[in-house]
Image (cartoon, helix red, strand yellow):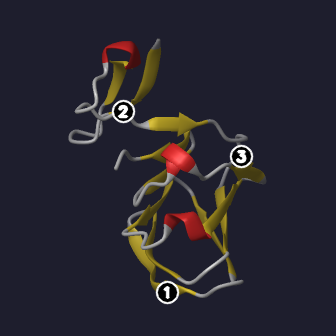
């Protein structure tokens, strides 16, 4: 099984052989999204959670997203969610598609690009 993604350290595209991946190796999962000219990310918070949102290289949010709040960001190239305090408290919608965000996808760093949603390994 081969997963196509970006390596964590270099950002270059790489093919990772998931069958040979051991517990010490990191594999970035990529969830495909509907193609649109602009990326649109909507977050719904089920509980208070701290996070930083970086849109096309600029920090646009660095605070607590309050319980029951809903925020939307648009980007041309990339939206990064980093330093997520409680990833289990977020519901993601990207370009109109609900993104399942539980279990192995509970990541503290998430990258949204035209390729899809990238869940960085813990």
* Residue at (28% x, 31% y) in the render: 23
Quadrant in which residue 68 is drawn? bottom right
Q: Is residue 42 left or right of residue 106?
A: right
Count residues near mark 1 (Cα–Cα under 10 Å), then give few for <14, some for 14-19, many for 20+.
some
Task: Locate residue 46, reporting x and y percent.
Answer: 67, 76
Q: Please name the residue that numbered disc 3 is placed on.
A: 36
Q: Is residue 109 left or right of residue 49?
A: left
Q: Please name the residue that numbered disc 1 is placed on.
A: 64
Count residues near mark 2 (Cα–Cα under 10 Å), then give few for <14, some for 14-19, many for 20+.
many
Question: Are dots 1 and 2 in contact, CB under 8 Å?
Answer: no
Q: Nearer the viewer, residue 90 or 9?
A: 90
Quadrant in which residue 6 is drawn? top left
Q: How far apart are the two marked residues, 3 and 2, measured between alpha carbons?
A: 26 Å
**Foreground label between 3 and 1:** 1
Q: Earlier in the sequence, mark 3 or mark 2?
A: 2
Q: Which mark is residue 27?
A: 2
Task: Locate residue 120, reporting x and y percent.
Answer: 39, 47
Q: Earlier in the sequence, mark 1 or mark 2?
A: 2
For the residue labelled by badge 1, is the local secondary structure a helix, a strand or a loop? strand
Relative to 96, does residue 64 appear above or below in the rendering?
Answer: below
* Residue at (56% x, 64% y) in the render: 88
**Foreground label between 3 and 2:** 2
Task: Locate residue 44, reporting x and y percent.
Answer: 69, 72
Question: Are dots 3 and 2 in contact, CB under 8 Å?
Answer: no
Relative to 30, does residue 18 appear above or below in the rendering?
Answer: above
Q: How far apart are the two marked residues, 1 and 2, measured between alpha carbons?
A: 29 Å
For the residue labelled by badge 2, is the local secondary structure a helix, a strand or a loop? loop
Relative to 25, does residue 78 appear above or below in the rendering?
Answer: below
Q: How far apart are the two marked residues, 3 and 1, measured between alpha carbons?
A: 29 Å
For the residue labelled by badge 3, is the local secondary structure a helix, a strand or a loop? loop
Task: Locate residue 8, reporting x and y percent.
Answer: 28, 41
* Residue at (67% x, 41% y) in the render: 33
């Amino acid at each position: 099984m081969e997963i196509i993604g970006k390596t964590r350290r270099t950002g270059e595209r790489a093919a990772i052989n998931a069958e040979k991946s051991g517990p010490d190796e990191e594999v970035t999962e990529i969830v495909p999204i509907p193609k649109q000219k602009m990326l649109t990310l909507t977050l719904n918070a089920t509980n208070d959670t701290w996070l930083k949102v970086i849109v096309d290289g600029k920090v646009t949010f660095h605070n607590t997203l309050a319980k029951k709040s809903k925020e939307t960001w648009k980007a041309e190239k990339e939206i990064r969610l980093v330093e997520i305090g409680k990833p289990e408290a977020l519901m993601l919608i990207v370009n109109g598609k609900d993104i399942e965000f539980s279990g192995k996808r509970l990541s503290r760093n998430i990258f949204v690009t035209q390729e899809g949603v990238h869940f960085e390994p813990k």
